[in-house]
Structure formats: C-alpha cells, structure tokens
Image (spheres, grey):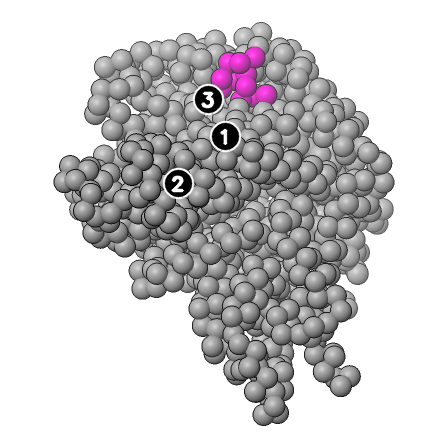
C-alpha cells in the first residue's frame, strides 16, 4: 500500500469516493444555512439557492427565546465544569502516579468501574438528589455533578507517568509544596493532556441536553441546546421551518467556529475518548 | 512526615467526595428505589418486587428495548462498514486527506440537536430533500419518519451520519499501527487485496473493532434526543427508545421507583449485550 | 493557597447564583398567575385593588416563572417546597394528584366557602370538582370550551346550509371537499386536522370532546376505575378512524409556514376560543368563520357537552394565612371583577350566571363570536378526579394512534385495550 503502486484509475476512484462522502457530510449543513436565510415559502422548494435571502428567521428566534442568555448560561456552565474537571482530574491523576498510599489501587479500580456504569442507572437517583439538595433550577445542578471525570483522571495519570520523577523530586528538594509542584511545574508541562481533557469536557457539557431538560425548568437558566430543543419541540416556533432551522444554526455556529480554528485538537482529543479500555 | 502521608489523600479528596455523593449514593439509592413506589411528592411506599412484576408485563418497556436493539442492529454494522471503508481510503497516500478528515468529523462536534432538527427537514414527506430527490428519480416517496417500519432505520441512518467521523478517525489510528512489512511479505506470496484485508488488516485492527462496537453499542442504548425531537417515540411507538421511555415514566408521570427499576434492568441488558459482543469478537479473530 | 481561594470564590459565586428569594412573608399572601399576558393584566388589576382595600393583608403577585409549561413549573415548585400560597391556573386534572399528596388546602373547611360555591356553580359542577375523599380543593375558575371552528365559504361551497351536526353530515362534507380538491390525483384540501402525535394532551382536541359530546358528559375515570369502555368511545373512535382512513384529515404534520385553517387548506378544526384572537390577527381579506358544537353520533339527543380545559384556583398547604388567601380568592371571583376578567382575557369564568347577568351580556353583545362559547359553557366538563389522569390520556392516546391513525385495530378492541391499560395504571 504505497504511493508508487496506486494506479491512476484507483486514485481517481478513491477521490470520487472521498468527494461524494464530503458532499454527503457538508451539503445538509449548507442547505440548513441557506434555508435559515430563505423566505419561508422557499424552504420547501429550493435545493441550493433560495430566491432571496434575509435575516427574518433569525430576528424571530431572538424575539421569541432568550438566545443570548442561554448562550451565556452554556458558556458559564461549560467553562466552570471544564475548569474543575482539569483541576480535580489532575490532582487525582497526580496522586495516583506520584504517591504510594494505602488504597491507591482500590481508587484506580473504582474509577474504572465508575466509568463503565451507564448513566441510565443513576439518572433517576441523581435527579432526586438534586431535588433534595434544592439544586434544581440553579447552576449547581448543571455543574457540580460533572466536576469529576474518570476519563480525565486516566488521561492525566497516563500523561504524568511520562514526566520523569526527577523533575518532581528536584522540585521537592527545592522546598516546593506538593500542590505547588502540581500546579506550577507539572501542569504547565502537561498541555496536551489539559487540552484533551478540556475539549472533551467542554464538548460533552456543551452538547448535553437530557440532564438540563430534567433539572432546569426556568427559561432564564436554560442552556443553549436545551432552549433550542424545547423551542423546536414545543409550540413557540409555530411550525415555521425557517425559524427552527435558524435556531439550529445559532446552536451550531459557536462550535463550528471553534472547530475550524482548533480542528486538529478536536479530532485527536475526541478520538482519545476511545481509549477507555 | 504525618503531613506528607496525608497529601495524597487530600489530593484525591475531591474525587472521593464526588464519588460518594454522585456515584455511590445514586447507585445504592436506585437499588432502594426499585422496591418502592414514589411519586416524589408523597411518602415512599414499599412495594417489594411490585415494580419488577409491572415491568415484566409492560409491553411498552419491552418494545422500547427491542426498538433500541433494532436501532443498534442497523446502526452499528452500518457504522463499522462505512467507517472502515473511509478509513481504508484515507489511509492511502492521497492529497488533501486532512481536509477530508476535517469534513467527515464535522457532524461529530455539532450538537445532536442541530443534526436532529436538520434531518427532520431532510426526512420531510411532502417537501423534504430526500423525497424530492426520489421524486426527481421518479421513485415513490418514502415516509421516512411517518412509516412505522421505516422510522427507526431512518433514525439509525441519521445517527450513523452524525457519528461515523469519530469512528473513521479511530480506525485510521488503528490502521496506522499495522506494520507495512506484513503487507509486503503477503505481496511476495501473491496474496490478493481481499486476502490481505481479511488476514492481516482485520486481525491487526481487532482491538479497534471491538472498541467501536462497544462504544457505539453503549451509545445506541443512550438513544434519546433523536426520537424526542423527531418523532416523540411514534409512529406506533416504533421509535420509543428505552431512555425516552424512562424519561417519560420518570419525569412526565413521576414514577420514580418504576423508572429506577427500568434503569437497573437496562443496565443489566447493556452489560449482557457488551459481554456477548466481546466474546464474539474475541472468538472470531 | 492561591488555588484554594480561587476555588472557594467560584463556589461562592455559584451558590449566590442559585440563591432563592425568601418569599413567605409573615402576614402576606404570595400569588402566582399564569404567564399569559392578559391574565397578568387581570392579576395586576385585582391585586392592586385588594391591596388598596386590605392594607394589613397584602398580596404579592408574580407570574409563574417561565418554564417548559406552567404544569411542570408548579410541580417543580411543589417538589422543591417553593410553592406560592395561591395559584390561579391549576389544570383541574392535576388537582387530585396534589390533593392526595396533601399539598393543597381543603377549601370546604374554610368559613363561608360552601355558600360561595353554591352561589357560583350548579350541583353538577360541584360534584365534578369534589375529590374522592369528599373534600373540595379547588375553585372552578375559567373554561375554554372546545368547539368546531369552520370556514364559512368553504362550507358554503359544499352546499351545506349549516355546519355539520352529526358524524354522517361531517363525513359527507369531508367527501365533497376532498373530491373538489383533487389535483392530479393528490388531495390538496382537507375537512380538518388533528395532531397525529401521541402527546397525551392532544386528545383534548379530538377524542375527549367528541366522547363528552356523544355521551352527554360521561366520565373517563370514576372512583379510580376506567369507565370509558362504552359505545360512546367506540363510536368516537370509529368516526375518527373513518376520517383518517379516507384521508379526510392529513396524516402528515402540516408544516408549512401558514396557518392551515386561515389559508383554506382545512375546512374545520376542533379548538377553543383563543383561536378568535389568532384569527382576527392573521386572517386574510374576506375570510369568514364561525363556531359550532362538536359533531355527534347520528342518533344523539339531549344537550351536547364538550371538554372545557378547566383551570382552577388552589391554595397550597404551605400557605401561612389560608383565610386571607381564601378571602382574596373570593374577591378574585366576585361578579364585577370577573366581568373585568372576561373583558381583558376573552376567557369565560366558570359560573352559572354567565349568560344571564347583564354585566356579562354587554361583553357578549360586543363580541358576538364568543356567544357560541357562552352558550356551550353550561355544558362543559372538566377532567375527572384521578391522580394519574395524564397517564390515562396517555394510554388512550397510544390506542388512538393504533386504531384511528393507522387502522391496526378495530375501535371496539382499541377502546377495550385502552380501558384495560388504564385500569392497570389506576391500580398502581
């Protein structure tokens, strides 16, 4: 399988295959964008280019639901969770790699065990917990339950293993406290791990819908995907396709922008979510 | 010295606290809940195995399990096939591979809600793009989401479209670990492309296959937002997924004990399916 | 150390965000209205009036916090223990659920309540809102009767002189409309439209009002037993099944931008008086419509009942001053005030003098489209007392889909199976 042996015909066939694939992935998004800009009567009939374009559907979305507020909520929630996941996961990963202590293996196995628990098992009791703590309809319900990520711990643990012990010991001799070693020496050297954990966490929280739908009922506290979901399912869109699609575009744009800038990081990070085993 | 010994425990303290509150407690509590009837606003009531008896006779629950398995049965093989094919091509020495990879990955990062709203329009009966294409080809139109026999396969196609990018990347990573020498020595023996694929590639990427199988099966059991937005579980409950049904019982009708019972049962089912998959893949390679 | 400070700062800010207002004042009453604009206007009016006249017993008012639906918000408030003292928009079908959980004040134990109720409602209504334990936890407040809106011109074209009264007349009209609308073998106009989705409350707009009309106001659930397995349910199912079988109603969700009724795609629809405001706002030039009672079986006689989408007033147990709350509600429902309410909201108060008192007649003279609803108001039924009524509607909905929309079952067996499943639910 190397370049020299690939004949021209095979090469062309491969490219055609790849292009068809690319069209299948991109065309729906382009159609959605154009439909959100098209006048309502056009949506049912155009294939690529509507008769005219305008922002009418977007104006309606902004009039009907608090999109900006929801965007802000999503940012607050996702960033808070990402911050804590990085801090707590690195702390735990650090403890698991650089210390010998009683129960270390037990903790590691508990982490692995927890990761293999499907959420279906804990969904109901977790909701009840939120109710009993009085956290429903607050940012607490959206953030605190996510503060720990087993995968995050595993990623940091693996990364810290590659950092030579000497670095750690030298810092200790210099009289650094352990926390200081972690946060000012190890973490700055663990950027790839941080990026991976951060992107995975951020994307996971940003895109989640089920949990917000369950714990948030106050429109002012809804996350963007939740708000858009309820908008699309409920009656507020008044079955206007353009408005629905415009709301979907608004939900897609922040992620697509981030993705186009950090595409490589996204791909490697999200692919590493497969290293669960 | 005492302080030094304490440090690792301080470091893992957040994890332990979080684990106790958000994992251990819910797991234990759900095992309590399964023996109770509770609508959250009245006191809990012990019902013994009542929830399980009800579950056994609940045709909607079993239909939702079958629906979910049906979804997995279509979605997972389709996913494997498409992902491997694209990965094989992307593994060839061609140009612009980075661009293609980025494009294929796009639906993976976009929220499932976006994809669902979008495909709901593509699937439209009167004016959806897919049916317009069929009409153009003078083929009969399809009730993508309204025909009871087709609605779930439609959702499976959509889910594949959304996730396949991730699995392409996983397979690509797997393919790149296959030593080139293996192919070269096979070439010397005059092996055909298919033989090389069957006897070298497949066994070498076996761990990836298992990974993709398990990941997309577990993903399949979480099916929720797609039917929630597109069909509400209809037509004829054919797209009612297990999580959607749990959601309905738990958060619509507030049968907390019963919903927890379904959660526990579903966990057991997931476990069995994943173990069977593992055994099967390990035996056949 | 730096980090610990940072972490605690973030934690603190999170808890500040989630802090809840402490709402229960010592002598006052907290009242939540729905978040419908007109109802808020009325709530403001009545609260200001009350506070002027009762300086020592202030009522504080806020619309129910925005959420998925007011039902869900109220439930979340009950679960979280953050209920208001008084709530004015409780769906009657939900009352039994809260009453049995001990979350509502039994109003019949309050001084003067029964006199008030007897003056307001006739005995059938009082019986309807009495809980299974014999207490009354709600004041019947307002109704939006479900009737048949029809496009006058479309109907005239079919040759009918008056809107279809019976199933046969309706089907005949539907056939004529369909035939006239065929374009290249495709149906372009329909007799009506009903949501095919199985969402439980969609049955308020097809099966349930038809069932009430056919049966003279029979119950779905009585004493925690399903009682709808009868010939009225079967004939209703059969009627709707015929409609869908013949493609008189579209089975696809009509997803065009325009309103299907106002754009002349459908000739009728089963809906409530809220349609008037909508139609007056969006109707095209020259569009004419009116309302008629729901169609009934051909052999029907006697009064024609329908579903009323009843919303009622309740006092939550968390209320510290139930008497003050009750006096406030009595003022809330006083004749003069409800005349104002009707004028502001175009929603009918559920009281027996609605068609007789001159204070109301002025309104109806000025709003003739509301007259059919006022006439219907005497024959309106609210949902039955059952803590699981939503689920009963849900199982009916599932059978409805099988039988009516997809013709997979006969009406008789669908109704029988629905009643069987409903009884299982009710036994739980």
The reply to whether the C-beta atoms of the residues labelled 1 and 3 are less than 8 Å apart is no
Q: CA distance from mark 1 to mark 3?
A: 15 Å
- The residue pinned by badge 1 equals B73
Image spot of residue A205 (x, y percent) = 51, 58
Asked whether residue C226 appears in the rendered view, the answer is yes
Residue at (58% x, 64% y) in the render: A153
Check residue B149 in the rendering and tell me which mark sits there, or answer none. Answer: 3
Mark 1 or 2, closer to the camera: 2
Q: Earlier in the sequence, mark 1 or mark 3?
A: 1
| Callouts 1 and 2 on one subunit | yes
Check residue B201 in the rendering and tell me which mark sits there, or answer none. Answer: 2
Mark 2 or 3, closer to the camera: 2
Image spot of residue B58 (x, y percent) = 69, 27
| Quadrant hosting residue A59 | bottom left
Q: Is residue C74 above or below residue A201?
A: above
Element on which disc 2 rests = helix
Q: Is residue C59 above or below residue C9?
A: above
Q: Which residues are magenta?
A: C399-409
């Amino acid at each position: 399988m190397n370049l020299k042996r690939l004949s021209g015909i095979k090469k062309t066939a491969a490219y055609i295959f790849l292009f068809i694939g690319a069209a299948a992935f991109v065309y729906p998004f382009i159609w959605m964008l154009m439909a959100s800009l098209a006048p309502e009567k056009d949506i049912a009939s155009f294939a690529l280019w509507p008769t005219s374009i305008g922002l009418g559907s977007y104006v309606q979305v902004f009039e009907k639901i608090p999109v900006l507020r929801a965007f802000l909520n999503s940012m607050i929630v996702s960033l808070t969770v990402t911050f804590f996941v990085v801090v707590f996961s690195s702390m735990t990963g650090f403890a698991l790699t650089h210390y010998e202590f009683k129960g270390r293996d037990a903790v590691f196995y508990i982490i692995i065990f927890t990761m293999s628990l499907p959420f279906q098992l804990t969904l109901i009791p977790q909701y009840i917990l939120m109710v009993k703590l009085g956290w429903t309809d607050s940012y607490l319900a959206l953030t605190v339950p996510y503060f720990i990520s087993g995968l995050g711990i595993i990623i940091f643990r693996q990364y810290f293993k590659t950092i030579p012990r000497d670095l750690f010991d030298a810092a200790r001799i210099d009289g650094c406290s352990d926390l200081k070693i972690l946060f000012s020496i190890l973490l700055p050297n663990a950027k790839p791990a941080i990026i991976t954990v951060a992107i995975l966490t951020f994307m996971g929280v940003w895109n989640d819908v089920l949990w917000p739908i369950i714990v948030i009922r106050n429109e002012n506290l809804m996350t963007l995907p939740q708000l858009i979901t309820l908008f699309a399912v409920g009656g507020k869109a008044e079955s206007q396709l353009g408005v629905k699609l415009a709301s979907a575009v608004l939900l897609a744009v922040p992620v697509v922008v981030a993705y186009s800038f950090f595409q490589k990081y996204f791909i490697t990070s999200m692919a590493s979510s497969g290293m669960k085993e | 010295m005492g302080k030094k010994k304490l440090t690792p425990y301080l470091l893992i303290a957040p994890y332990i606290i979080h684990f106790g509150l958000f994992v251990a407690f819910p797991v234990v509590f759900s095992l309590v809940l399964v023996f109770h009837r509770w609508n959250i606003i009245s006191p809990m009531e012990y019902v013994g195995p009542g929830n399980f008896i009800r579950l056994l006779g609940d045709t909607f629950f079993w239909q939702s399990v079958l629906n979910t398995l049906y979804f997995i049965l279509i979605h997972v093989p389709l996913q494997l096939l498409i992902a491997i094919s694209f990965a094989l091509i992307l593994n060839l020495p061609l140009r612009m591979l980075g661009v293609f990879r980025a494009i294929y990955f796009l639906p993976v990062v976009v929220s499932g809600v976006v994809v669902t709203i979008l495909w709901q329009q593509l699937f439209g009966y009167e004016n959806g793009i897919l049916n317009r294409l069929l009409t153009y080809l003078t083929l009969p139109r399809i009730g993508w989401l309204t025909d009871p026999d087709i609605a779930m396969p439609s959702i499976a196609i959509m889910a594949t479209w959304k996730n396949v990018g991730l699995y392409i990347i996983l397979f690509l990573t797997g393919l790149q670990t296959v030593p080139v020498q293996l192919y070269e020595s096979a070439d010397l023996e005059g092996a055909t492309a298919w033989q090389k694929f069957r006897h070298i590639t497949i066994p070498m990427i076996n761990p990836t296959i298992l990974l993709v199988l398990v990941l997309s099966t577990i993903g399949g059991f979480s099916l929720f937002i797609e039917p929630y937005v597109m069909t509400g579980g209809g037509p004829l409950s054919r797209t009612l997924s297990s999580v959607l049904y749990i959601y309905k019982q738990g958060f619509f009708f507030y049968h907390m004990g019963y919903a927890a019972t379904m959660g526990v049962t579903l966990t057991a089912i997931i476990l069995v399916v994943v173990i069977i998959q593992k055994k099967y893949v390990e035996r056949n390679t | 150390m730096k980090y610990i400070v940072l972490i605690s700062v973030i934690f603190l800010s999170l808890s500040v965000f989630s802090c809840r207002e402490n709402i229960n004042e010592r002598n006052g009453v907290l009242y939540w209205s729905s978040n419908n604009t007109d109802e808020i206007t009325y709530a403001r009016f009545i609260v200001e009036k009350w506070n002027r006249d009762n300086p020592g017993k202030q009522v504080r008012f806020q619309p129910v916090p925005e959420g998925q639906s007011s039902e869900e918000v109220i439930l979340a408030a009950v679960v979280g223990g953050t209920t208001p003292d008084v709530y004015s928009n409780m769906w009657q079908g939900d009352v039994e659920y809260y009453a049995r959980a001990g979350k509502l004040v039994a109003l019949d134990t309050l001084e003067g309540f029964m006199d008030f109720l007897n003056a307001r409602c006739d005995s059938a209504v009082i019986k309807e809102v009495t809980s299974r334990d014999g207490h009354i936890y709600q004041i019947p407040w307002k109704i939006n009767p479900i009737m048949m809106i029809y496009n006058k011109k479309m109907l005239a074209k079919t040759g009918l002189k008056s809107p279809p009264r019976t199933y046969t007349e309706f089907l005949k009209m539907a056939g004529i409309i369909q035939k006239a609308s065929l374009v290249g073998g495709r149906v372009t106009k329909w007799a009506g439209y009903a949501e095919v989705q199985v969402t439980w409350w969609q049955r308020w707009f097809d099966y349930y009002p038809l069932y009430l009309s056919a049966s003279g106001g029979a119950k779905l659930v009585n004493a925690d037993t399903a009682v709808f397995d009868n010939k009225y349910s079967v004939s209703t199912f059969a009627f709707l099944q015929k409609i869908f079988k013949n493609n008189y109603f579209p089975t696809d969700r009509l997803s065009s931008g325009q309103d299907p009724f106002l754009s002349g795609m459908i000739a009728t629809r089963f809906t409530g008086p809220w349609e008037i405001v909508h139609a007056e706002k969006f109707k095209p030039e020259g569009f004419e419509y009116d309302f008629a009672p729901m169609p009934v079986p051909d052999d029907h006689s006697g009064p024609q009942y329908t579903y009323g989408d009843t919303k009622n007033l309740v006092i939550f147990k968390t209320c510290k001053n139930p008497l003050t709350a009750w006096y406030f509600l009595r003022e809330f429902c006083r004749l003069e005030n409800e005349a104002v309410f009707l004028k502001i909201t175009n929603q009918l108060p559920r009281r027996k003098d609605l068609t007789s008192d001159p204070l109301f007649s002025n309104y109806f003279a000025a709003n003739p489209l509301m007259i059919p609803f006022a006439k219907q108001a005497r024959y309106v039924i609210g949902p039955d007392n059952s803590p699981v009524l939503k689920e009963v509607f849900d199982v009916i909905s599932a059978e409805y889909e099988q039988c009516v929309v997809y013709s997979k079952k006969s009406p008789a067996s669908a109704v029988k199976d629905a009643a069987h499943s409903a009884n299982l639910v009710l036994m739980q």
